[in-house]
């Protein structure tokens, strides 16, 4: 009863604020109702910060039965209560129209899992601000396509936002990427799950900006001679929650997968990447990023997740995220052109490789050299072209969203940049807008998106089969020097150390303790080109950290192992 009364009070206060007058910048906006849900937030005089710590605010949502209008004076019938809120985004956080991360809370600050706008119950949400993308569609369209392909991607709902009595325009309420039975549906990983099947999942990782965030660094450069490093950042559990044994397991899993991908037999159905990857998910990830020609694809906001081995345990690509620089609206990295492969640009363009700090993991090139993987892409492309990616279906959805936003878009463009407008003076870094500078109206935006998408689909139709010409026959794959991580690690009885040679070499593999004293010699012989391994039993050695080293010609490499009996 007390909570119910408190929610009524919050609703009344927020309603009074909104009915006083809705401002849009320095002018009063005639905003009394909408065909979209209306979200009203009051920070009670506090400034919303970027990232943590969040502030506590009040939020109410007006969402009447589908087809009925939502009036600014209506009661808050979808949510009325506390939230914590922050500004979110990387480069987009510097733009005038802000995106927000929020959590629904109880009065005591604890999580309040609720259903918002018909989406499954949770407490972590995002209010995404379409700003650079003046069609409001690119992220929402991509997420919808991923869902239709059978993969989880964030559910979305268009709305209009009023913040502290000031109109903020069209927003998209969407689900934050999170482990949950209704989101990324993998096993919960508790801190005490540190061995056996327990420790094998679930995990969510990502390749992204903010390379300072904790994670696991790849031992392989994105391309030969690269100075950039790929880091697999922790998302779930995050860096504060993951325990040492879980981090060690994940590091070994990624290290083993990358070692396999760096090897000559990486495509072997028994010992190669199909043992580690949910291959269909990576094929569909490729299709979505190439359909949209996403200039952030493969290298930024590139999420992957892994469930426990007992639930499949393979690394799955996704959920897809952050496609606002896609579908032809960006003026760099060839993103404006409907022709060409975006991944191919990343892998081959010398200026990009030398000048951009965020590269594509090396194993994407290897995947595209495997005829089985490429054939899977081709087959799935043609399957999706029958329905999900049929041009008529894509155009129908784009038109339907445009119709839904027809009224709200006028209000949005009263306060924010519209088609053909330059960035506002207060905007930070802004990408080149060459492809869309000529657009003068929202209908121009929609027609451009439809035309570009149709041209892109047709180009892929005409060129997807040619991807096979880039593959490498099994017998022609080259070997390199590689020293893999021992399996298992930690070692209790015996362990296997894998390695690879590009030719015939005298090979030495020695084990050293932390004092640098050699405690064992495992290999001291001439060996042929190819993949090798040596089995070692650390009998007689005490628990602790040891180093193993391989020498072959001028090649030297070391790795750590842990004896734990």
Image (cartoon, rainbow, N blue to C red):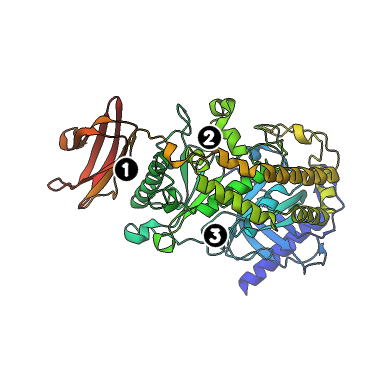
Q: Are circles 1 and 3 on residues that touch, CB within 8 Å?
A: no
For residue 212, side relative to residue 460 (left or right): left
Q: Secondary structure at mark 1?
A: loop
| Mark 3–mark 2 distance (CA, rounded to whole Å) | 40 Å
Residue at the (38%, 56%) spot, across then down: 200
Q: Are discs 3 and 2 less than 8 Å apart at CB?
A: no
Residue bearing the label numbered 2: 359
Q: Quadrant of the N terminus?
A: bottom right
x and y percent of residue 401 in the render?
78, 55
Numbered circle sitting on residue 109: 3
Give residue 60's mark: none
Which residue is at a point 78% across and 59% down the rendered structure image?
Answer: 36
Q: Earlier in the sequence, mark 1 or mark 3?
A: 3
Q: Name the front one of labels 1 and 3.
A: 1
Packing grade of label 2 (10 A; few <14, some 14-19, many >=20) is many
200 left or right, relative to 337: left
Residue 487 lies, with reference to residue 477, above or below; the image says below
Which residue is painted at 68% across and 66% down in the image? 118
Q: Determine the secondary structure under disc 3.
A: loop
Question: Which element carries disc 2, helix, strand or loop?
Answer: loop
Of the numbered discs 3 and 2, the one sitting upstream in the chain is 3
Q: Which residue is mark 1?
A: 485
Report the side of 114 relative to 531 (left or right).
right
Relative horizontal placement of residue 306, taking residue 380 as reference (left or right): left
């Amino acid at each position: 009863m007390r909570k119910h009364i408190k929610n009524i009070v919050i609703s009344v206060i927020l309603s009074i604020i909104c009915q006083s007058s809705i401002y849009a910048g320095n002018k009063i906006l005639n905003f009394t109702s909408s065909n979209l849900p209306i979200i009203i937030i009051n920070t009670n005089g506090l400034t919303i910060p970027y990232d943590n710590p969040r502030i506590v605010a009040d939020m109410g949502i007006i969402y009447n039965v589908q087809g009925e209008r939502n009036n600014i004076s209506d009661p808050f019938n979808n949510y009325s209560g506390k939230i914590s809120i922050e500004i979110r985004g990387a480069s987009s956080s510097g733009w005038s129209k802000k995106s927000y991360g929020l959590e629904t809370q109880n009065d005591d600050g604890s999580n309040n899992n609720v259903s918002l706008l018909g989406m499954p119950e949770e407490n972590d949400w995002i209010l995404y601000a379409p700003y650079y993308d003046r069609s409001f569609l690119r992220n929402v369209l991509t997420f919808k396509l991923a869902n239709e392909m059978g993969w989880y991607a964030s559910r979305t709902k268009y709305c209009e936002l009023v913040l502290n009595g000031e109109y903020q325009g069209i927003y998209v309420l969407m689900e934050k990427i999170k482990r949950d039975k209704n989101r990324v549906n993998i096993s919960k990983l508790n801190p005490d799950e540190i061995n056996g099947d327990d420790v094998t999942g679930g995990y969510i990782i990502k390749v992204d900006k903010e390379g300072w965030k904790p994670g696991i660094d790849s031992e392989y450069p994105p391309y030969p001679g690269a100075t950039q490093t790929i880091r697999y950042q922790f998302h779930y559990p995050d860096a504060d929650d993951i325990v040492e044994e879980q981090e060690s397991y994940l590091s070994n899993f990624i290290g083993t997968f990358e070692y396999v991908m760096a090897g000559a037999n990486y495509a072997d159905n028994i010992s190669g990447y199909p043992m580690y990857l949910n291959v269909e998910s990576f094929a569909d990830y490729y299709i979505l990023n190439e359909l949209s020609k996403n200039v952030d694809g493969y290298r930024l906001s590139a999420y992957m997740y892994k469930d426990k081995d007992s639930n499949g345990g393979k690394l799955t690509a996704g959920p897809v995220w952050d496609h606002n620089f896609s579908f032809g609206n960006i003026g760099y990295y060839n993103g404006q052109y409907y022709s060409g492969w975006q991944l191919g640009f990343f892998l081959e363009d010398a200026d990009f490789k030398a000048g951009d700090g965020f590269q594509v993991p090396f194993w994407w090139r290897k995947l595209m050299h495997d005829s089985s993987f490429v054939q899977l892409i081709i087959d799935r492309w043609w399957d999706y072209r029958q329905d999900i990616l049929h041009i008529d279906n894509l155009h129908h959805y784009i038109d339907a969203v445009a119709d839904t936003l027809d009224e709200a878009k006028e209000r949005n463009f009263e306060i924010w940049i519209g088609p053909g407008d330059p960035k506002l003076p207060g905007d930070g870094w802004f990408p080149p807008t060459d492809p869309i500078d000529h657009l003068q109206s929202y209908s121009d935006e929609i027609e451009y998106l439809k035309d570009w998408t149709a041209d892109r689909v047709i180009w892929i139709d005409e060129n997807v089969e040619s991807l096979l010409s880039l593959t490498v026959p099994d017998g022609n794959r080259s070997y390199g020097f590689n020293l893999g991580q021992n399996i298992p690690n930690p070692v209790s009885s015996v362990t296997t150390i894998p390695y690879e040679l590009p030719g015939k070499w005298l090979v030495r593999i020695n084990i050293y303790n932390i004092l640098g004293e050699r405690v064992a010699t495992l290999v001291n012989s001439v060996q042929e080109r190819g993949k090798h391994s040596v089995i070692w039993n650390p009998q007689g050695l005490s628990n602790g950290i040891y180093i193993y080293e391989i020498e072959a010609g001028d090649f030297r490499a070391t790795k750590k192992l842990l004896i734990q009996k």
